[in-house]
Amino acid sequence: MHASMKVLLAGAALLGAAAASQPPSRPGMDRHRIAVQRFGNDAPWYEQRIPFFESADPRIDAVYHYRWSLFRAHQRDLGEEGFISTEFLDDVDWQRHPYASLNDATGFHLAEGRWLNDRRYADDYLNFMYASGGNDRRFTDYMADSVWGRYLGSGPITGGVEV
């Protein structure tokens, strides 16, 4: 391997390790208040899983939290196979059955969820797509790029297969 490639990979590994640690919340940020205000009765799910954010612009804050509510709404619990993200809230007749996985959207879903504190959602999804037959291998490059981005955000996947 060329020396510059080794340096690049070593730097990426260091960045990934640094990004995998939990960033501290801004001093004085009331995560519980924000979660209850933004997510109501579902606040506990968000309190444990998303990085919280507040800015000087309430419109930016609203969009940020709205994106997380959409991410949550698109989670599908497959039981023993864990969680995947679906593209549509309602089933459509052309989705990949039986779980409504949509291969071309997987990279986007992984990119959206890479900042979750609970790594299980991305881990389960990756294992489903690569090990359990969810991926028909038509969009592997796009997914692989998102797997790399997820690794940089939170480290290697847990359980299942390493990709």
Image: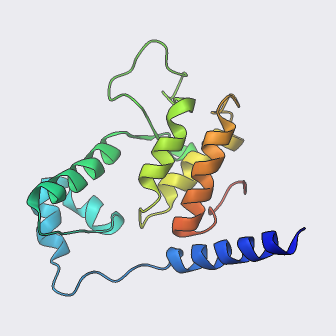
The picture places residue 141, in percent across and down from the top left corner, at: 67, 41
Which quarter of the rendering shows the N terminus?
bottom right
Residue at point 80%, 73% (across, down): 4
Task: Answer left or right for 73 relative to 146.
Answer: left
Residue 105 seen: yes
The picture places residue 123, in percent across and down from the top left corner, at: 57, 55
**In the rendered image, the vertical position of residue 48 relative to residue 147, given as above or below:** below
Residue at point 43%, 62% (across, down): 115
Would you identify the image quadrant in which residue 59 lies?
bottom left
**In the rendered image, the vertical position of residue 14 relative to residue 37, given as above or below:** below
In the foreground, 152 or 119: 152
In the image, farthest residue toward the right:
1
The picture places residue 107, in percent across and down from the top left corner, at: 54, 42
The picture places residue 106, in percent across and down from the top left corner, at: 53, 39
Residue 127 seen: no
Would you identify the image quadrant in which residue 37 lies?
bottom left
**In the rendered image, the vertical position of residue 18 relative to residue 162, given as above or below:** below
Task: Answer left or right for 104 relative to 64.
Answer: right
Task: Answer left or right for 24 relative to 40.
Answer: right
Residue at point 71%, 31% (across, down): 137
In the foreground, 42 or 16: 16
